[in-house]
């Protein structure tokens, strides 16, 4: 990653016997915001693996690309260059509908909370569960337990 003069973060390759042990596999990933003369590169040639079950902490100066990087892994943005596999599925080249499917399997806590101010805290949480289906039974289960 590189922005605001920050040095790019080099990815850590971990010796893994089998690629299926990797939750996230990233190869030569670049990402740009904007188009034409306004195009600005935010992520630079990232190659990095995250094994399943590993807790990872990403640090860097403000503007170095942490949120951009996480939003790509979370299938929240369309990818431009390189390869990014989440649980073995290649996200580069996926359609928007395919990215939505991948998103359903990923939990995400946003830096800005992205909550609806018109809803209460519990309604904000309930709305996500409702969109996933089975809301009535999940609510009954939660109340019972
Ligand atoms: N939606 C956007 N449109 C254009 N440029 C953007 C957009 N989002 C981020 N950027 C730019 O991309 C670069 C990386 O930003 P990003 O938000 O990923 O950094 P960050 O490491 O998460 O910073 P912070 O620690 O402040 O949260 C910055 O130069 C930023 O200005
Ligand atoms: Mg951020």
Image (cartoon, rainbow, N blue to C red):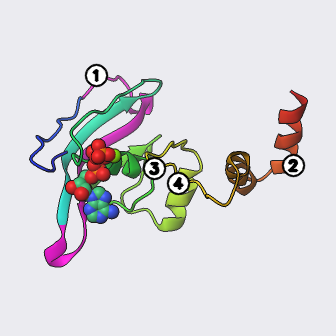
Residue 38 sits in quarter: bottom left
Marks 3 and 2, Cα distance to the nearest angstrom? 29 Å
Disc number placed over residue 112 in the picture, else none: 3
Is disc 2 surrounded by few (<14), some (14 to 19) or many (20+) residues within 10 Å?
A: few
Are the two marked residues, 4 and 3, in contact with CB atoms closer than 8 angstroms? Answer: yes
**Towards the viewer: 141 or 10:** 141
Q: Is residue 122 above or below residue 16?
A: below
- Looking at the rendered structure, the secondary structure element under dot 1 is loop
Marks 2 and 1, Cα distance to the nearest angstrom? 45 Å
- Looking at the rendered structure, the secondary structure element under dot 3 is loop
Q: Where is residue 111 shown, x and y percent of the image?
A: 43, 45
Which residue is labeled 4 in the image?
114
Which residue is labeled 2 in the image?
136
Give the position of the C terminus as an image quadrant.
top right
Query: Which residue is found at the position 15% from the left and 47% from the top?
Result: 2
Disc number placed over residue 15 in the picture, else none: 1
Q: Is residue 129 above or below residue 142?
A: below
- Magenta run includes residue 16: yes
Per the rendered image, the range of residues in magenta is: 13-39
């Amino acid at each position: 990653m590189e922005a605001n003069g920050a040095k790019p973060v080099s990815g850590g390759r971990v010796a893994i016997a089998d690629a299926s042990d990797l939750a996230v596999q990233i190869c030569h990933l670049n990402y740009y915001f904007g188009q034409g003369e306004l195009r600005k590169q935010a992520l630079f040639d990232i190659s990095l693996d995250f094994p399943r079950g590993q807790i990872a902490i990403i640090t860097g100066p403000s503007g170095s690309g942490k949120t951009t990087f996480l939003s790509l892994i979370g299938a929240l943005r369309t990818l431009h260059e390189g390869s990014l596999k989440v649980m073995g599925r290649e996200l580069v080249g996926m359609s928007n509908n395919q990215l939505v499917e991948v998103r359903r399997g990923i939990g995400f806590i946003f830096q800005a909370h992205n909550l609806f101010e018109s809803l209460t805290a519990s309604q904000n949480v309930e709305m996500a569960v409702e969109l996933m289906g089975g809301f009535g039974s999940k609510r009954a289960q939660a109340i019972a337990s």
